[in-house]
Image (spheres, rainbow, N blue to C red):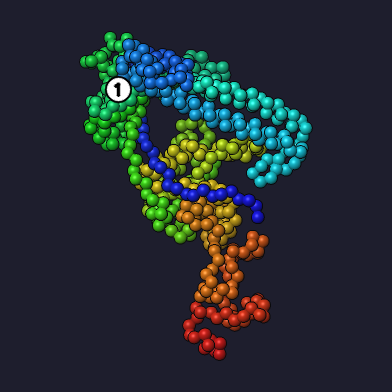
């Protein structure tokens, strides 16, 4: 029997810790646009300068250097703007630091995989979970060169990490690269410059509980009035008291408007961010705050009810509802999405599919959905599956990160828990043990993805994926003489139902059993056993 890796225990995933909502600032005048642009550009320059200083500090950063940076920014803005800028710089450095570690681990996996394949004979086939050798001498030589290149990159990244150096692009690396490829991006230099500058603006302010409306820097009333505390060099643009500028346009939140208004009226902290969309020519504002984490429902309590198992795929979600005993109920569901096109389109498709799943769970009064804890970091490696380009593209197309975040945020709003299960062998065993029986019971073709969703649901409920287990020693009709259902994988019809009782009772010939099989009295018939023998 092949070695199987251990199966991790299922657990209830934690819900989101914050809330973010967005709305458009309507009725913005040219004067409002001018002020927003001047403030965004001025604070953006300060933010860029502060981030550069934070990167230079590296691992030598401490509370004193943070205070010095904030003090230098306060004279050119305000204490609250300076606090927001320095905090954003520190968070950006920390994020880049985590990305650097992930990149180092990716390079280490690549070097390790190539070295393993180089040490194997040419043309050798790989074992389970282990790639084989390269096919030709030319491919071996090319991969040898690639391993040396990856090792050189790895040494550089390790040296940077040791010194605390990170590489950050304010405005985004993707937008920076478009500057050198304007024609493929469909942009002119003017268009690119406008987008680049808008991405580098800084109009973000953290909230503070106890202050008026929860934020002293960017303030929004329940009527939608937006006002900004101007930096010191731009104080002459103020049109209200205390150096504030009140926009002519207003911002009215639709989604979670009641929750936001309750926080504002109670003067609880709310953070705001203003950004400009060049493509749409509109200004938007985001409001975010920390939410209290709801107490997690115990796993045993969720297993007492019905569960929906969900199998995640590159273009759809396959789902099936299971009862508390692990049996599929009703018909399976498929929620399709198209992940081609822009990021906004892909995100909208994903939200639409998850919305359908959540509404179905609500209609069925299901309080838990089960998802696989997916991580395809190693499976997407070109070093492990270099020739299998379509397979790598298929794995890369599954939106594991976004789906995880979306599922947790959307289910938390309707008080549905998410059970995360180990993805090991769910597709293989679901297809092996459930696809054929479900085809018979539903009189339709069951896909391997829906069979996998049943396996995921059973694992979330704490059951084994295999359909049947061995009968008790003295079952009503078996008397420990019937074959066990834990048959070998080579046994034909091992997943089928046991033969029924023939018209001749327990005649061994009628049951196609050997002569010395013994007498097995059927206890489910009426009357005493001795009467049935002489009837």
Image quarter in which the C terminus is found? bottom right
Q: Is residue 38 visible?
A: no
Q: Residue at point 62% right, 64% down?
A: 487
Residue closer to the observer: 445 or 117: 117
Which quadrant holds residue 127? top right
Up/down of 419 relative to 500, above or below: above
Residue 138 percent across, percent down from the top left: 76, 30
Q: Residue furthest bottom?
A: 534
The quadrant of the rendering that contains the N terminus is bottom right
Pick the front one: 338 or 199: 199
Instruction: Provide residue 96's location: percent of width, then percent of height.
Output: 49, 25
Where residue 273 sits, quadrant-wise, is top left
> Which residue corresponds to mark 1?
218
Q: What is the number of callouts on the image?
A: 1
Q: What secondary structure is found at the residue carrying circle 1?
A: strand
The answer to whether residue 299 is left or right of residue 313 is left
Q: Position of residue 16 (x, y in %)?
A: 39, 38
Quadrant hosting residue 154: top right
The residue nearer to you, when weighing 152 against 29, is: 152
Position of 44 relative to 14 (above/below): above
Left or right of 408 on screen, residue 378: right
Within 10 angstroms of label 1, few (less than 14), some, or many (20 or more) residues? Answer: many
Vertical arrangement, residue 429 with respect to residue 145, above or below: below
């Amino acid at each position: 029997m092949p070695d199987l890796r251990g199966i991790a225990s299922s657990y209830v995933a934690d819900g989101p810790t914050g809330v973010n909502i967005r709305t458009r600032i309507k009725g913005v005048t040219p004067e409002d646009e001018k002020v927003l642009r001047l403030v965004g550009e001025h604070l953006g320059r300060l933010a860029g300068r502060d981030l550069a200083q934070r990167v230079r500090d590296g691992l030598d950063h401490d509370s004193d250097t943070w205070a010095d940076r904030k003090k230098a920014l306060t004279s050119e803005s305000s204490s609250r703007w300076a606090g927001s800028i320095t905090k954003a710089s520190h968070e950006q450095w920390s994020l880049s630091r985590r990305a650097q570690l992930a990149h180092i681990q990716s390079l280490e996996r690549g070097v390790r995989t190539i070295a393993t394949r180089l040490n194997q004979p040419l043309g050798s086939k790989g074992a389970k979970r282990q790639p084989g050798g390269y096919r030709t001498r030319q491919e071996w030589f090319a991969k040898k060169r690639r391993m040396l290149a990856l090792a050189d990159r790895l040494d550089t990244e390790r040296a940077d990490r040791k010194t605390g150096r990170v590489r950050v692009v304010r405005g985004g690396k993707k937008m920076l690269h478009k500057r050198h490829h304007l024609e493929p991006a469909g942009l002119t230099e003017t268009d690119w410059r406008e987008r680049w500058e808008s991405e580098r603006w800084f109009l973000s302010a953290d909230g503070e509980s106890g202050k008026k409306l929860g934020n002293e820097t960017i303030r929004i009333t329940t009527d939608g009035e937006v006002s900004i505390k101007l930096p010191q060099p731009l104080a002459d643009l103020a049109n209200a008291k205390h150096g504030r500028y009140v926009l002519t346009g207003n911002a009215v939140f639709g989604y979670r408007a009641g929750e936001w208004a309750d926080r504002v009226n109670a003067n609880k902290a709310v953070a705001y961010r203003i950004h400009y969309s060049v493509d749409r020519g509109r200004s938007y504002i985001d409001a975010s705050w920390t939410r209290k984490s709801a107490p997690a429902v115990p796993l045993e309590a969720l297993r007492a009810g019905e569960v929906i198992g969900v199998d995640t795929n590159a273009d759809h979600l396959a789902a099936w509802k299971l009862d508390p005993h692990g049996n599929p109920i009703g018909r399976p569901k498929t929620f399709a999405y198209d992940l081609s096109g822009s990021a906004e389109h892909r995100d909208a498709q994903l939200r639409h599919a998850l919305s359908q799943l959540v509404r179905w769970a609500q209609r069925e009064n299901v309080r838990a959905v089960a998802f696989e804890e997916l991580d395809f970091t190693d499976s997407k490696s070109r070093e492990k599956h270099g020739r299998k380009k379509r397979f790598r593209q298929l794995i890369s197309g599954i939106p594991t990160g976004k789906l995880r975040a979306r599922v947790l945020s959307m289910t938390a709003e309707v008080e549905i828990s998410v059970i995360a299960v180990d993805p090991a062998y769910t597709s293989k065993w679901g297809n092996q043990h459930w696809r054929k029986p479900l085809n018979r019971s539903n009189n339709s073709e069951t896909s391997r993805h829906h069979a996998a969703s049943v396996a995921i649901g059973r694992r979330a409920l704490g059951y084994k994926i295999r359909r049947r287990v061995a009968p008790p020693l003295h079952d009503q009709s078996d008397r420990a003489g019937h074959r066990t259902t834990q048959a070998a994988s080579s046994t034909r019809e091992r997943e089928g139902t046991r033969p029924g009782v023939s018209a001749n009772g327990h005649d061994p010939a009628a049951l196609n059993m050997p002569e010395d099989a013994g007498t097995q009295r059927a206890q489910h018939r009426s009357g005493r056993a001795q009467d049935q023998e002489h009837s």
